[in-house]
């Protein structure tokens, strides 16, 4: 490699980007993998999500008299659509950084060095997508947006509607609670999260405190009387799966980590509902304005002399709110 003509753009061609994503390890994240798995992620060729495009619950309709009009499946009126906000991160490699890398053998290990740096950009955009997905379970996204206010107090919002709720008869930390009471609550939540075309796969998400209560109640049963199966943070009950979810995301407004499942709450989700995560058209000409899960590029800048590495995506997690039910359990 001629150091004087060092050009990082050669590592960001379409072929190089595809090859890099194939080389890098798959990123796991609880909400995206459970509610928005690969089968529910699509490349959406617009920058605005039309109000008619998000999947909806399929409901039955009346039959019609022969020779009369068909039943219209009306879309929402009075709204043009949702405007997803992009996720864009960057990393600067100054001329001084590159000189240091060359001294350490960059010219021999350039591909691995670039992969490592792009992987950090990729993981950051994925973590942000996971935070948006986590917020979507409430029926609303309210996420800090970097704008004219330096304190990130502006919010990017998207409202999908109201999720279901369930009022339990007895708090789980009540001294008289039994495993039968807990199962009754979970089944009731699962029933509320069911729809005409979904509800066969119900996951109940709780945090560690609630999960520990369930474990304690199960230990009281003689010889696993319910014949339950447990695997790490999952217990499979008849009719639903109980999952311990301890993941968090950073709240820039409150300046602290926020649990996906708040203390004292439980969330029932029909994971077979048509929740949808489109990757919308990226606002970048070098990306050909294409909808991509992740796009990276290198741009040479002059002051200071450097290469700027970018990672971009524009995800928009859309939940089926009728397939989600929350309850206060502690």
Image (cartoon, rainbow, N blue to C red):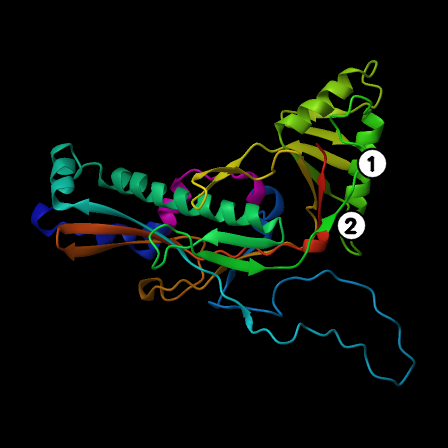
Query: Where is 101 relative to 32, above or below?
Result: above
| 202 relative position to 96: left or right | right
Q: Which mark is residue 67?
A: none
Q: Position of residue 221 (x, y in %)?
A: 82, 17
Q: Which of marks 2 and 1 is in front?
A: 1
Residue 54: quarter of image:
bottom right
| Label 2 vs 1, first from the N-terminus | 1
Query: Where is 264 relative to 253, above or below?
Result: above
Q: What stretch is highlighted in magenta?
A: 18-32
Toward the left, the furthest residue is 4
Q: Is residue 239 visible?
A: no
Q: Where is residue 116 in the image (x, y as percent from the top left)?
A: 31, 38
From the image, which quarter does the N terminus lie in?
top left
Name the foreground residue: 172 vs 53: 172
Residue identified by numbered label 1: 169
Q: How crowded is mark 1: few (under 14 residues within 10 Å), some or many (20 or more)?
A: few
Q: Position of residue 240 (x, y in %)?
A: 76, 37
Residue, x 73% and y 50% (percent of image)? 164
Q: Can residue 225 be seen in this view?
A: yes
Report the number of numbered marks: 2
| 207 relative position to 253: left or right | right
Toward the right, the furthest residue is 65
Q: How far apart are marks 2 and 1 (CA)?
A: 21 Å
Q: Position of residue 250 (x, y in %)?
A: 45, 40
Q: From the image, give the main secondary structure of the stretch colored magenta.
A: helix
| Callout 2: SS | loop
Residue identified by numbered label 2: 194
From the image, which quarter does the C terminus lie in?
top right
């Amino acid at each position: 490699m001629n150091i004087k003509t060092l050009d990082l753009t050669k590592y960001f061609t379409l072929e190089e980007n595809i090859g890099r994503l194939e080389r890098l390890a798959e990123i796991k994240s609880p909400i995206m993998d459970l509610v928005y798995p690969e089968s529910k992620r699509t490349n959406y060729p617009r920058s605005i999500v039309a109000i008619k495009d998000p999947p909806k619950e399929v409901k039955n309709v009346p039959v019609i008299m022969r020779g009369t009009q068909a039943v219209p499946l009306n879309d929402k009126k009075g709204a043009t659509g949702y405007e997803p906000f992009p996720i864009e991160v960057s990393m600067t490699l100054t001329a001084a950084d590159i000189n240091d890398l060359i001294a350490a053998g960059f010219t021999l290990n350039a591909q691995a060095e670039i992969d490592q740096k792009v992987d950090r950009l990729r993981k950051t955009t994925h973590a942000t997508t996971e935070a948006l997905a986590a917020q979507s379970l409430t029926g609303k996204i309210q996420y800090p947006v970097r704008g004219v206010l330096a304190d990130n107090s502006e919010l990017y919002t998207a409202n999908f509607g109201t999720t279901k709720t369930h009022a339990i008869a007895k708090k789980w930390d009540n001294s008289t609670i039994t495993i039968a009471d807990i199962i009754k609550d979970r089944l009731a939540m699962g029933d509320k999260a069911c729809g005409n075309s979904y509800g066969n796969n119900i996951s109940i998400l709780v945090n560690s405190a609630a999960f520990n209560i369930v474990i304690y109640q199960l230990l009281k049963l003689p010889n696993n009387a319910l014949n339950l199966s447990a695997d790490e943070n999952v217990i499979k009950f008849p009719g639903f799966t109980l999952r311990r979810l301890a993941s968090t995301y950073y709240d820039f407004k409150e300046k602290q980590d926020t649990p996906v499942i708040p203390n004292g709450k439980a969330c029932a989700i029909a994971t077979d509902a048509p929740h949808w995560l489109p990757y919308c058209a990226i606002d970048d000409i070098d990306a050909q304005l294409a909808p991509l899960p992740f796009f990276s590029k290198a741009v040479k800048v002059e002051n200071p002399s450097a290469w700027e590495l970018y990672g971009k995506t524009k995800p928009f997690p859309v939940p089926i709110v009728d397939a989600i039910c929350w309850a206060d359990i502690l």
